[in-house]
Image (cartoon, helix red, strand yellow):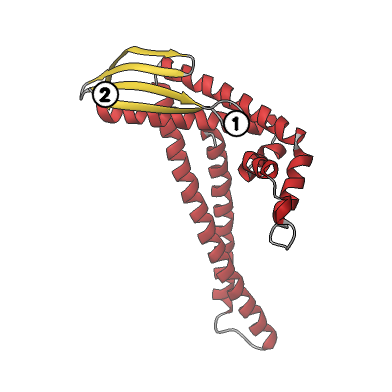
């Protein structure tokens, strides 16, 4: 969730809290005015309902305040992420852009592949669900096992996602990857004094980062990026 979106949700939540507090104050006023003035059973019912409404409103206010706290925590984290992303050098930004593009394209292709083979997948799962019955084990062929292994349940979720959702997911994952790498580097170097010896090429980031506390060597190893395996980057960051 972007900072702007979180701020809008916080504003809406604060308005809900304000309305709830006004309602509570109104209910408390009515209850106070009725105390010691109950004359008949109708007054007793009204008084009891007012107290019940007050309890419900206090519980709802507590829930709203909890939701507001969580949103404020999300806002703080989002602001910190944006601050980090503004600090990262062009090499890391290039890596983020390339990962976003690569992971998005992989998801698009994975979704198309799953749809193309949907009938075969459904038949394999039908057989899998019946293997516990006598006589069905013979249908669990190596080919069926391979289909079930290839098209996992986690693979399937892309089928019902739009291009926009797949892109947003790829972008989020790329940002998370870059932020973690940046924090890992700064843990070794402290304040960075030079990124000049860091180079980005073909989804790989390699080189040495110089800092006030020390220097960090970066080495990137790539794997996957074809079939069902999304491109995976293993980044080694060592103090030198």
Q: Nearer the viewer, residue 112 or 170?
A: 112
Q: CA distance from mark 2 to mark 1?
A: 31 Å
Q: Nearer the viewer, residue 146 or 73?
A: 146
Q: Is residue 9 visible?
A: yes
Q: Which mark is residue 83?
A: none
User: Image check: 1 left or right of 161?
Assistant: left
User: Image check: 110 left or right of 184?
Assistant: right
Q: Residue furthest top?
A: 196
Q: Nearer the viewer, residue 219 or 4?
A: 219
- How many numbered badges does the structure rendering display? 2
Percent position (x, y) of residue 26?
58, 65
Q: Nearer the viewer, residue 149 or 199?
A: 149
Q: Are there few (<14), some (14-19), or many (20+) residues within 10 Å of tag 2?
A: some
The residue indicated by pointer 1 is: 168
Q: Quadrant of the N terminus?
A: top right
Q: Residue furthest left?
A: 213
The residue positioned 70% from the left and 84% from the top of the image is 42
Please identify the quarter of the rendering in which residue 191 is found: top left
Q: Which mark is residue 191?
A: 2
The residue positioned 57% from the left and 58% from the top of the image is 20
The vertical placement of 228 against 65, above or below, is above
Percent position (x, y) of residue 213?
20, 25
Counting residues from the start of the chain, the first of labels 2 and 1 encountered is 1
User: Image check: 217 left or right of 114?
Assistant: left
Q: Quadrant of the C terminus?
A: top left
């Amino acid at each position: 969730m972007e900072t702007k979106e979180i701020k809008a949700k916080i504003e809406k939540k604060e308005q809900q809290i304000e309305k709830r507090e006004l309602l509570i104050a109104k209910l408390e006023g009515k209850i106070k005015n009725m105390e010691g003035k109950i004359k008949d059973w109708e007054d007793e019912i009204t008084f009891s309902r007012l107290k019940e409404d007050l309890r419900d409103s206090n519980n709802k206010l507590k829930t709203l305040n909890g939701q507001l706290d969580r949103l404020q925590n999300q806002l703080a984290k989002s602001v910190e992420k944006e601050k980090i992303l503004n600090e990262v050098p062009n090499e890391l930004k290039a890596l983020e852009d390339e990962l976003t593009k690569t992971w998005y394209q992989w998801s698009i292709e994975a979704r198309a592949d799953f749809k193309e083979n949907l009938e075969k997948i459904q038949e394999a799962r039908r057989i899998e669900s019946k293997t516990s019955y006598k006589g069905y084990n013979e249908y669990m062929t190596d080919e069926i096992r391979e289909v079930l292994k290839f098209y996992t349940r986690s693979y399937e979720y892309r089928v019902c996602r739009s291009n926009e959702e797949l892109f947003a997911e790829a972008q989020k994952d790329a940002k998370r990857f870059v932020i973690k790498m940046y924090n890992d580097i700064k843990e070794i170097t402290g304040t960075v004094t030079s990124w000049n010896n860091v180079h980005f090429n073909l989804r790989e980031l390699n080189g040495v980062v110089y800092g006030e506390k020390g220097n960090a060597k970066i080495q990137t190893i790539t794997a996957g990026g074809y079939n069902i395996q999304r491109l995976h980057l293993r980044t080694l960051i060592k103090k030198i």
